[in-house]
Amino acid sequence: MMETHSTGIKSEAEIGGVRGLLRHVYRSVIRHGYPDTPRNRSLVIISNLFLHIHSVRVHKNSLRAGYTLGLGVLSFVFFIILAVTGVILMVYYIPSPDQAYDRIKDLEFVIPGGRLIRNLHRWSAHGMVAVVILHMARVFYTGSYKNGREFNWVVGIVLLVLTLGLSYSGYLLPWDQLAFWAVTIGANIAASPVELTDALGITEYADIGGMTKRLLLGGNEVGADALIRFYVLHCVVLPLAAAVGIGVHFWRIRKDGGLSRPGEKAHGHNGEAP
Amino acid sequence: MSVAVKPEIRRERAFTEPKTYGLMALARGKTAAVDKGPEDTVPTWPTVMILEITLLMGAMAAMMILSLLFDAPLKEIANPAVPENPAKAPWYFLGLQELVGYSALMGGMIIPLIVLIGLALIPYLDRESKGIGQWFSGSTGKRVTLRTAVFSFVLSAGLVALTVNFGWLRSWFPEINQLVIIAINPGTVLVVGVVLWSLLVVRQTKSRRMGAIAVFTFFLVSFVVLTWVATFYRGPNWDFYWSSSQWPGGH
Ligand code: HEM
């Protein structure tokens, strides 16, 4: 028998020459043999930062297409498509009322592939909202918010709000009529507590609506300040928050013992029997 | 049970079933359990990877085709002096916009807040542990879903039909105080409707899970109905038109 390294292969240092060097380099990155044994298949997952989000083995029910409908993964896929196309759009976009619209026109008519990237970003944004809502419905109707998954459901609701916020804040950026008036509606909704304070005759003293509207827009109208605020929300604050939230969401799935399945044993918190 | 468990072990078990597999399973050589994973499991590699990559490529291909066929909208440059009419929010907010006409406060802030808090509280209101991992938690759930869907469709579509044909409080009593409309409008009627309906379901089925199914289905169906109406049947001044070809002003 050969001496085995901790990764299950012959120690590279023992092989000389160029071939040995190349093997050494390869093995320093891919630290396992060909994944055709249970051991190496496990190592693929646990020795890779991106894959170790998965457990090494997964319950068959979690793979049933008719169970998850792939919707959670699709939500994440859309998030990734949006992040990549969004960064490309950022390279050309300038968040100022003087330039934003022209930059979008450039993307549409001048920059090679610009229109495709913008289309991808726009349609994927709609897709993500739809898929996240459907994912929530799948989780709900399969009763997957129970048995230790209560908190992950709440994390999901936060992700839903972030998804809607991302989509909505992006709506203003092209600075066209559609953007301007849709966001004006939103801002008027933010100002709507004046309905109550007006009816009570106390707007003068406690203008809650006006305050929230000014907080959102940085002024009383949708203008340059509003555009910058929406830009920062759309390109920095909300994507970061969503990325962190998705991380928590995935981590909790692992902590909650993988996906829900029929006939799973009820288990309470802290290992206590319910 | 009075088995003494060391505290570390108990903590490790939090939220998960004790697993009978782990890296210990990775011994050299074959065992009698080859190809039949413990607890009905399969190795993540390659099955899950293949599924995930398929979803990734499928979604990318679909978006690519959509993007080659249809261009994202871009209207004239923003002009504060020329209001869009109708000015519509993106589709997922149109259901709310349908309610905002009566009261922006109730339709645009309070009801969304109620919906969000209600959704977040679902796992804490329904704490039954039956029916996990099963679509609709069984046949009763399917029946509740179906009946709730019919009821909420009739109620939400009926409210729209009522207001389109006969208006609402302000058209009947022009002098009415806005506080009354904030309190009583199609949005709040829907909220009261879902509360009463789900209480009824809980009483009849003696199950909170069924109550939760009633609430969620109600929310989903009225969301779809209102979004549909606002997307396809609302024109200038938020008036009702069966088709945008009937809009005045040659749109
Ligand atoms: C950005 C949005 C979201 C992403 C990327 C995401 C991603 C995922 C993924 C990949 C899974 C694995 C199972 C599956 O594919 O269905 C999952 C499960 C889950 N998600 Fe989400 N999700 C999102 C939003 C939500 C929302 C809005 C909710 C509910 C309000 C939610 C609640 C849950 C729960 C409770 C599970 C565990 C399901 C089970 O154990 O069967 N998630 N999510």
Image (cartoon, helix red, strand yellow):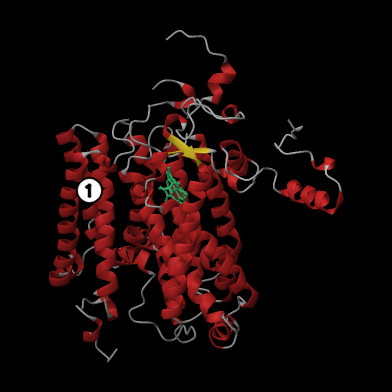
Against B70, residue A30 (above or below) is above
Q: Residue B225 in the image: x percent, y percent? A: 24, 63
Q: Residue furthest right?
A: A17
Task: Give the crowd class for mark 1: few <14, some 14-19, many >=20 residues within 10 Å.
Answer: many
**Which residue type does callout 1 highlight?**
Val
Q: Residue furthest top?
A: B2
Query: Is residue B66 at all visible to an observer of this figure?
Result: yes
Q: Quadrant of the C terminus of chain A?
A: top left
Q: Residue furthest front?
A: A1
Question: Of residues B67 and B84, which is closer to you in this image?
Answer: B67
Against A86, residue B239 (above or below) is below
Question: Of residues B53 and A235, which is closer to you in this image?
Answer: B53
Going 30% across and 45% down the picture, which residue do you hit? A141
Question: Of residues B189 and A257, which is closer to you in this image?
Answer: A257
Provide the chain ID for the residue under circle 1: B
Q: Is residue B127 left or right of residue A10?
A: left
Q: Residue A108 in the image: x percent, y percent? A: 53, 84
Which residue is tagged 1?
Answer: B194
Going 50% across and 66% down the picture, which residue do you hit? A169
Quadrant housing residue B144: top left
Against B235, residue B183 (above or below) is above
Going 26% across and 64% down the picture, which residue do you hit? B226
Against A271, residue A187 (above or below) is below
Q: Residue B113 in the image: x percent, y percent? A: 38, 52
Q: Residue A10 in the image: x percent, y percent? A: 76, 38
Quadrant housing residue B12: top right
Going 70% across and 36% down the picture, which residue do you hit? A8
